[in-house]
Amino acid sequence: MRIVSLVPSATEMLFALGLMDEVVAVTHECDYPPAAATLPRVTRDRLPAGLTTAQIDAAVKERTLKGESIYELDTALLHELQPDLIITQALCKVCAVSVDDVRAVAEEIDSQPMVVALDPHTLGEVLGDARTIAQATDAKDAAVDLIREAATRIDRVRLLVRGARRPRVVALDWLDPPYAAGHWTPQMIDYAGGEDVLGFAGEGSQEQAWELVAATEPDIVIVMPCGFDAEIAHREAEMHREQLAALGAGEVIAVDAAAYFSRPGPRLVDGLELLAYLIHPELVDISDELAARAITVDV
Protein backbone atom coordinates (compact mmCIF):
# COMPACT_ATOMS: atom_id res chain seq x y z
CA MET A 1 0.00 0.00 0.00
CA ARG A 2 1.18 3.51 -0.83
CA ILE A 3 0.24 5.97 1.92
CA VAL A 4 0.43 9.77 2.00
CA SER A 5 0.11 11.47 5.39
CA LEU A 6 -1.09 15.05 5.49
CA VAL A 7 -0.86 15.36 9.28
CA PRO A 8 2.26 15.05 11.50
CA SER A 9 0.32 13.12 14.14
CA ALA A 10 -0.87 10.61 11.54
CA THR A 11 2.71 10.20 10.35
CA GLU A 12 3.77 9.39 13.91
CA MET A 13 0.89 6.93 14.23
CA LEU A 14 1.76 5.20 10.96
CA PHE A 15 5.37 4.75 12.05
CA ALA A 16 4.26 3.52 15.49
CA LEU A 17 2.11 0.90 13.75
CA GLY A 18 5.11 -0.34 11.77
CA LEU A 19 3.89 1.04 8.44
CA MET A 20 6.91 3.24 7.73
CA ASP A 21 7.83 1.33 4.55
CA GLU A 22 4.41 2.08 3.07
CA VAL A 23 4.50 5.84 3.68
CA VAL A 24 5.54 7.52 0.42
CA ALA A 25 5.07 11.20 1.34
CA VAL A 26 4.35 13.48 4.30
CA THR A 27 3.89 17.16 5.14
CA HIS A 28 6.59 19.79 5.49
CA GLU A 29 6.03 19.68 9.28
CA CYS A 30 6.48 15.92 9.68
CA ASP A 31 9.76 15.73 11.62
CA TYR A 32 9.16 12.71 13.87
CA PRO A 33 10.36 10.06 13.81
CA PRO A 34 13.49 11.48 12.15
CA ALA A 35 13.10 9.09 9.20
CA ALA A 36 9.86 10.86 8.29
CA ALA A 37 11.77 14.04 7.50
CA THR A 38 13.57 12.27 4.64
CA LEU A 39 10.36 11.49 2.74
CA PRO A 40 8.93 13.63 -0.10
CA ARG A 41 6.79 16.53 1.11
CA VAL A 42 3.42 17.26 -0.43
CA THR A 43 2.59 20.45 1.48
CA ARG A 44 4.14 23.85 2.02
CA ASP A 45 3.42 26.77 4.31
CA ARG A 46 1.51 29.72 2.88
CA LEU A 47 2.52 32.05 5.72
CA PRO A 48 5.75 34.01 5.30
CA ALA A 49 8.67 33.21 7.58
CA GLY A 50 9.66 35.44 10.49
CA LEU A 51 6.18 36.37 11.74
CA THR A 52 5.65 37.14 15.41
CA THR A 53 3.10 35.09 17.33
CA ALA A 54 0.65 38.00 17.17
CA GLN A 55 1.12 38.21 13.40
CA ILE A 56 0.67 34.45 13.07
CA ASP A 57 -2.58 34.65 15.04
CA ALA A 58 -3.83 37.51 12.86
CA ALA A 59 -2.92 35.69 9.65
CA VAL A 60 -4.59 32.48 10.81
CA LYS A 61 -7.78 34.35 11.75
CA GLU A 62 -7.80 36.08 8.37
CA ARG A 63 -7.47 32.78 6.50
CA THR A 64 -10.09 31.14 8.71
CA LEU A 65 -12.60 33.85 7.83
CA LYS A 66 -11.85 33.21 4.16
CA GLY A 67 -12.14 29.45 4.62
CA GLU A 68 -8.49 28.99 3.67
CA SER A 69 -5.75 26.81 5.15
CA ILE A 70 -2.24 27.92 6.01
CA TYR A 71 -0.99 24.91 4.03
CA GLU A 72 -0.82 24.44 0.27
CA LEU A 73 -1.06 21.00 -1.32
CA ASP A 74 1.35 19.89 -4.04
CA THR A 75 -1.24 18.28 -6.29
CA ALA A 76 1.24 17.52 -9.08
CA LEU A 77 3.39 15.43 -6.73
CA LEU A 78 0.30 13.64 -5.41
CA HIS A 79 -0.64 12.64 -8.94
CA GLU A 80 2.90 11.41 -9.51
CA LEU A 81 2.92 9.34 -6.31
CA GLN A 82 -0.37 7.54 -7.09
CA PRO A 83 -1.22 6.77 -3.44
CA ASP A 84 -3.72 4.14 -2.32
CA LEU A 85 -4.51 5.94 0.96
CA ILE A 86 -4.37 9.60 2.02
CA ILE A 87 -4.70 10.39 5.72
CA THR A 88 -5.67 13.92 6.72
CA GLN A 89 -7.61 15.52 9.57
CA ALA A 90 -10.76 17.53 10.15
CA LEU A 91 -9.85 18.76 13.65
CA CYS A 92 -8.26 22.11 12.78
CA LYS A 93 -9.38 24.17 9.79
CA VAL A 94 -6.02 25.86 9.37
CA CYS A 95 -3.51 23.22 10.51
CA ALA A 96 -4.02 20.91 7.53
CA VAL A 97 -5.22 21.12 3.96
CA SER A 98 -9.02 21.22 3.74
CA VAL A 99 -10.57 17.74 3.78
CA ASP A 100 -12.86 18.77 0.93
CA ASP A 101 -9.85 19.90 -1.11
CA VAL A 102 -8.07 16.61 -0.43
CA ARG A 103 -11.10 14.58 -1.49
CA ALA A 104 -11.48 16.64 -4.65
CA VAL A 105 -7.87 16.00 -5.59
CA ALA A 106 -8.16 12.31 -4.72
CA GLU A 107 -11.04 11.91 -7.16
CA GLU A 108 -8.76 13.10 -9.96
CA ILE A 109 -5.87 10.73 -9.17
CA ASP A 110 -5.78 7.59 -11.32
CA SER A 111 -5.20 5.31 -8.32
CA GLN A 112 -8.44 6.61 -6.72
CA PRO A 113 -7.00 6.69 -3.18
CA MET A 114 -9.18 6.27 -0.13
CA VAL A 115 -9.22 9.41 2.07
CA VAL A 116 -9.35 8.99 5.84
CA ALA A 117 -9.95 12.15 7.90
CA LEU A 118 -9.09 11.97 11.60
CA ASP A 119 -10.95 14.20 14.06
CA PRO A 120 -9.90 13.45 17.66
CA HIS A 121 -10.95 15.67 20.55
CA THR A 122 -10.01 13.51 23.54
CA LEU A 123 -7.19 11.20 24.54
CA GLY A 124 -9.46 8.21 23.98
CA GLU A 125 -10.32 9.40 20.48
CA VAL A 126 -6.62 9.78 19.70
CA LEU A 127 -6.11 6.13 20.59
CA GLY A 128 -9.20 5.34 18.56
CA ASP A 129 -7.42 6.82 15.54
CA ALA A 130 -4.93 3.97 15.80
CA ARG A 131 -7.84 1.59 15.21
CA THR A 132 -9.10 3.71 12.31
CA ILE A 133 -5.72 3.68 10.60
CA ALA A 134 -5.26 -0.01 11.36
CA GLN A 135 -8.56 -0.89 9.69
CA ALA A 136 -7.51 0.98 6.56
CA THR A 137 -4.04 -0.60 6.46
CA ASP A 138 -4.52 -4.11 7.86
CA ALA A 139 -2.38 -3.33 10.90
CA LYS A 140 -4.89 -4.42 13.53
CA ASP A 141 -2.47 -6.47 15.64
CA ALA A 142 -0.03 -3.56 15.86
CA ALA A 143 -2.87 -1.24 16.85
CA VAL A 144 -3.98 -3.58 19.63
CA ASP A 145 -0.44 -3.61 21.02
CA LEU A 146 -0.04 0.17 20.75
CA ILE A 147 -3.38 0.87 22.46
CA ARG A 148 -2.74 -1.69 25.19
CA GLU A 149 0.66 -0.18 26.02
CA ALA A 150 -0.74 3.37 25.98
CA ALA A 151 -3.66 2.41 28.20
CA THR A 152 -1.31 0.73 30.68
CA ARG A 153 0.83 3.83 30.94
CA ILE A 154 -2.21 6.09 31.30
CA ASP A 155 -3.62 3.90 34.07
CA ARG A 156 -0.26 3.91 35.84
CA VAL A 157 -0.23 7.72 35.95
CA ARG A 158 -3.79 7.91 37.23
CA LEU A 159 -3.03 5.42 39.98
CA LEU A 160 0.10 7.28 41.06
CA VAL A 161 -1.77 10.56 41.60
CA ARG A 162 -5.06 9.15 42.89
CA GLY A 163 -6.08 10.81 46.14
CA ALA A 164 -3.38 13.48 45.91
CA ARG A 165 -4.03 17.21 46.19
CA ARG A 166 -5.20 18.75 42.91
CA PRO A 167 -3.40 22.01 42.11
CA ARG A 168 -5.21 24.57 39.97
CA VAL A 169 -3.62 24.44 36.51
CA VAL A 170 -3.83 26.77 33.51
CA ALA A 171 -2.49 25.52 30.18
CA LEU A 172 -1.89 28.19 27.54
CA ASP A 173 -1.35 27.05 23.97
CA TRP A 174 -0.77 30.60 22.70
CA LEU A 175 0.32 33.80 24.43
CA ASP A 176 -0.30 36.67 22.02
CA PRO A 177 -3.23 36.62 22.48
CA PRO A 178 -3.58 34.03 25.25
CA TYR A 179 -5.50 30.86 24.43
CA ALA A 180 -6.67 28.25 26.92
CA ALA A 181 -5.61 24.84 25.66
CA GLY A 182 -8.55 22.61 24.83
CA HIS A 183 -9.30 19.26 23.22
CA TRP A 184 -7.35 16.52 25.04
CA THR A 185 -5.21 18.83 27.22
CA PRO A 186 -7.74 19.45 30.06
CA GLN A 187 -8.33 15.70 30.20
CA MET A 188 -4.59 15.07 30.40
CA ILE A 189 -4.31 17.58 33.25
CA ASP A 190 -7.11 15.78 35.08
CA TYR A 191 -5.44 12.39 34.60
CA ALA A 192 -2.15 13.92 35.78
CA GLY A 193 -3.69 14.96 39.09
CA GLY A 194 -4.47 18.61 38.41
CA GLU A 195 -7.58 20.73 37.95
CA ASP A 196 -7.74 22.63 34.67
CA VAL A 197 -9.44 25.89 35.68
CA LEU A 198 -9.61 27.45 32.21
CA GLY A 199 -9.92 24.86 29.44
CA PHE A 200 -12.72 22.39 28.71
CA ALA A 201 -12.07 18.78 27.77
CA GLY A 202 -13.12 17.95 24.23
CA GLU A 203 -13.67 21.60 23.30
CA GLY A 204 -11.43 23.70 21.08
CA SER A 205 -8.82 26.10 22.42
CA GLN A 206 -10.40 29.42 23.38
CA GLU A 207 -8.98 32.94 23.24
CA GLN A 208 -8.96 34.58 26.67
CA ALA A 209 -8.15 37.95 28.22
CA TRP A 210 -5.20 38.02 30.60
CA GLU A 211 -7.51 39.40 33.29
CA LEU A 212 -9.75 36.35 33.00
CA VAL A 213 -6.77 34.01 33.17
CA ALA A 214 -5.63 35.77 36.36
CA ALA A 215 -9.11 35.46 37.84
CA THR A 216 -8.79 31.67 37.84
CA GLU A 217 -6.00 31.99 40.44
CA PRO A 218 -3.83 29.17 39.10
CA ASP A 219 -1.19 27.38 41.16
CA ILE A 220 0.67 26.22 38.05
CA VAL A 221 0.79 27.69 34.56
CA ILE A 222 1.92 25.45 31.70
CA VAL A 223 3.06 27.40 28.63
CA MET A 224 2.62 25.20 25.56
CA PRO A 225 2.40 27.34 22.39
CA CYS A 226 1.00 25.16 19.62
CA GLY A 227 3.73 23.67 17.46
CA PHE A 228 6.66 25.11 19.44
CA ASP A 229 9.40 23.24 21.28
CA ALA A 230 10.38 23.94 24.88
CA GLU A 231 13.11 26.44 24.03
CA ILE A 232 10.85 28.57 21.84
CA ALA A 233 8.02 28.26 24.37
CA HIS A 234 10.40 29.51 27.08
CA ARG A 235 11.45 32.43 24.89
CA GLU A 236 7.80 33.33 24.27
CA ALA A 237 7.10 33.10 28.00
CA GLU A 238 9.97 35.47 28.77
CA MET A 239 8.55 37.93 26.23
CA HIS A 240 5.29 37.85 28.25
CA ARG A 241 6.93 37.74 31.65
CA GLU A 242 4.88 40.67 33.01
CA GLN A 243 1.52 39.10 32.07
CA LEU A 244 2.54 35.69 33.38
CA ALA A 245 3.84 37.14 36.65
CA ALA A 246 0.50 38.90 37.15
CA LEU A 247 -1.26 35.52 37.23
CA GLY A 248 0.21 34.90 40.68
CA ALA A 249 1.01 31.24 40.06
CA GLY A 250 3.64 29.51 42.14
CA GLU A 251 5.17 27.94 39.04
CA VAL A 252 5.26 28.82 35.35
CA ILE A 253 6.71 26.12 33.14
CA ALA A 254 7.34 26.06 29.38
CA VAL A 255 7.06 22.67 27.70
CA ASP A 256 7.67 21.04 24.33
CA ALA A 257 4.20 21.30 22.81
CA ALA A 258 5.26 20.21 19.34
CA ALA A 259 6.35 16.82 20.63
CA TYR A 260 3.97 16.09 23.49
CA PHE A 261 0.82 18.21 23.39
CA SER A 262 -0.08 19.81 20.04
CA ARG A 263 -0.13 16.66 17.94
CA PRO A 264 -2.80 14.05 18.69
CA GLY A 265 -0.50 11.08 18.32
CA PRO A 266 1.22 8.40 20.40
CA ARG A 267 3.50 10.87 22.20
CA LEU A 268 0.55 12.41 24.04
CA VAL A 269 1.12 9.64 26.57
CA ASP A 270 4.64 11.00 27.13
CA GLY A 271 3.01 14.40 27.57
CA LEU A 272 0.70 12.97 30.20
CA GLU A 273 3.65 11.55 32.12
CA LEU A 274 5.45 14.89 31.85
CA LEU A 275 2.39 16.75 33.16
CA ALA A 276 2.05 14.34 36.08
CA TYR A 277 5.70 14.91 36.98
CA LEU A 278 5.30 18.70 36.80
CA ILE A 279 2.13 18.68 38.90
CA HIS A 280 3.20 15.94 41.34
CA PRO A 281 7.00 15.59 41.31
CA GLU A 282 6.75 13.96 44.74
CA LEU A 283 4.76 11.07 43.24
CA VAL A 284 5.89 10.64 39.65
CA ASP A 285 9.30 9.81 38.24
CA ILE A 286 10.19 10.25 34.56
CA SER A 287 13.38 10.02 32.52
CA ASP A 288 15.87 12.87 32.56
CA GLU A 289 15.38 13.21 28.82
CA LEU A 290 11.65 13.81 29.18
CA ALA A 291 12.09 16.09 32.19
CA ALA A 292 14.43 18.24 30.09
CA ARG A 293 11.51 19.07 27.79
CA ALA A 294 10.13 21.36 30.50
CA ILE A 295 11.83 24.65 31.41
CA THR A 296 10.91 26.72 34.46
CA VAL A 297 10.12 30.34 33.67
CA ASP A 298 11.51 32.85 36.15
CA VAL A 299 8.67 35.30 36.81
Image (tube, rainbow, N blue to C red):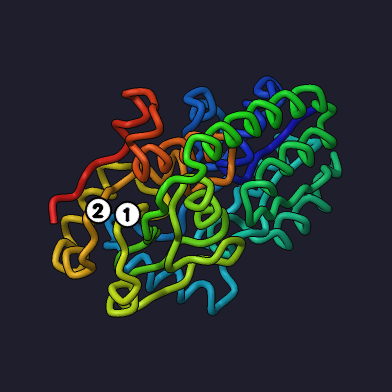
Q: Which is nearer the N-term, disc 2 or disc 1?
A: 1
Which kind of residue does numbered mark 2 sit on? Val
Residue in the image at 51% along x and 57% along y = 186
- Between the residue at mark 2 and the residue at mark 1, the CA separation in whole angstroms equals 7 Å
Quarter the N terminus occupies: top right
108 or 289: nearer the viewer: 289
For this rendering, which residue is in front, 146 or 67?
Answer: 146
Nearer the observer: mark 2 or 1; the answer is 2
The residue where tag 1 is placed is 223
Task: Give SS at disc 2.
Answer: strand
Q: Quadrant of residue 291?
A: top left
State the mark number for residue 288: none
The residue that disc 2 covers is 252
Residue 47's place in the image compared with 156, above or below, is below
Res 276 quadrant in image: top left
Left-right relation of 94 to 117: left
Q: What secondary structure is found at the residue carrying circle 1?
A: strand
- Which of 233/153 is in front? 153
Question: What x and y, as percent, mark residue 122?
Answer: 63, 53
Does residue 257 appear to the left or right of 10 in the view shown? left
Location of residue 152 with respect to 62 vertically, above or below? above
Question: Toward the viewer: 220 or 111?
Answer: 220
- The crowd level at tag 2 (other Cα within 10 Å; few <14, some 14-19, many 20+) is many
Q: Are marks 2 and 1 in contact (CB under 8 Å)?
A: yes
Residue 178: percent from left, percent from top:
34, 69
Residue 21 at what x, y percent from top left?
A: 68, 20
The residue depicted at 45 percent of the width and 58 percent of the height is 195
| Rendered position, 59 above or below 83 | below
Q: Could you tell whether 119 is left or right of 40 in the image?
A: right
Dot 1 crowding, Cα within 10 Å, few <14, some 14–19, many 20+: many
Three-letter residue code for mark 1: Val
Of all residues, the one furthest to the front in this rendering is 163
